[in-house]
Image: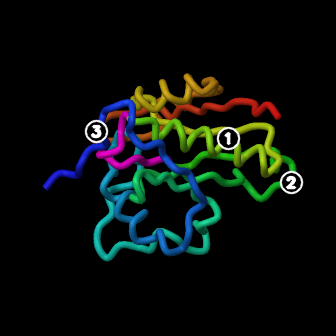
Amino acid sequence: MSEPMIPSTSHAAKPLIRPADRADGKDLSELDRDTWSTLHAVLPRAEPPYPPFFDAKHPPEEILVAEVDGRIAGFLRLLAPSSLAANAHVRLIQGLAVARWARGHGVARALLRAAMDEARRLGAVRITLRVLGHNEPARALYASEGFKVEGVLPGEFLLEGKYVDDVLMGRTLAP
């Protein structure tokens, strides 16, 4: 059975963005597996037994969750790029997923804008991300939100027999 779509009317529910809670782990894990694709993933598809979504290296505090009508519609991981004081002014987006039923209704854009707001709140003046070169929809979204290509690692990944570029993007966060 397919997932119900968000109604495509002007009255479609606006995504609610909130911090993740440890209780979201099961739903986020399922969403992460359901949205897996070589369009954006460099790790192989997860196989059972599945690891927990949250662990010591991936705490709930790094995750923003999008809800539509009380259902988890997407998530974004926002973290410090390293433990170095020299780049404490930067935040890194490392993972963005939107449920198939919620695509095309502003969920990814809402998560991205919330991540920029959260990064500012945490004192960041820059935000960065990495995106696979062949992921044109994501690259277009990021560009529309002010992200610029700051570097390209040509052929960095071998996915399904094809070499794929790793594109580094970033932007300044105005106060």
Q: Amino acid at mark 2?
A: Ala
Decide: is 36 above or below 60: above
In magenta stretch: residue 101: yes
Specify the farthest residue to the right. Answer: 85
Residue 81 image offset from top left, x and y in percent: 70, 51
Decide: is 175 above or below 30: above
Residue 44 image offset from top left, x and y in percent: 34, 56
Secondary-structure class at tag 2:
helix
The numbered mark, 1 or 2, whose residue comes first in the sequence reads: 2
Q: Amino acid at mark 3?
A: Gly
Q: Which mark is residue 161?
A: 3
Q: Which mark is residue 88?
A: none
Q: Image point 64% across, 24% down: which residue?
A: 146
Q: Image point 43% across, 40% down: which residue?
A: 157
Colouring scheme applied when the structure was drawn: rainbow
Q: How many marks?
A: 3
Q: Is residue 126 left or right of residue 66?
A: right
Quadrant of the rendered image containing residue 46: bottom left
Q: Image point 64% across, 64% down: which residue?
A: 61
Residue placed under numbered mark 1 in the picture: 116
The numbered mark, 2 or 3, whose residue comes first in the sequence reads: 2
Foreground pick, 154 / 98: 98
Residue 17 image offset from top left, x and y in percent: 56, 51
Q: Which mark is residue 85?
A: 2
Q: Mark 1 or mark 2: which is in front? A: 1
Q: Mark 2 or mark 3: which is in front? A: 2
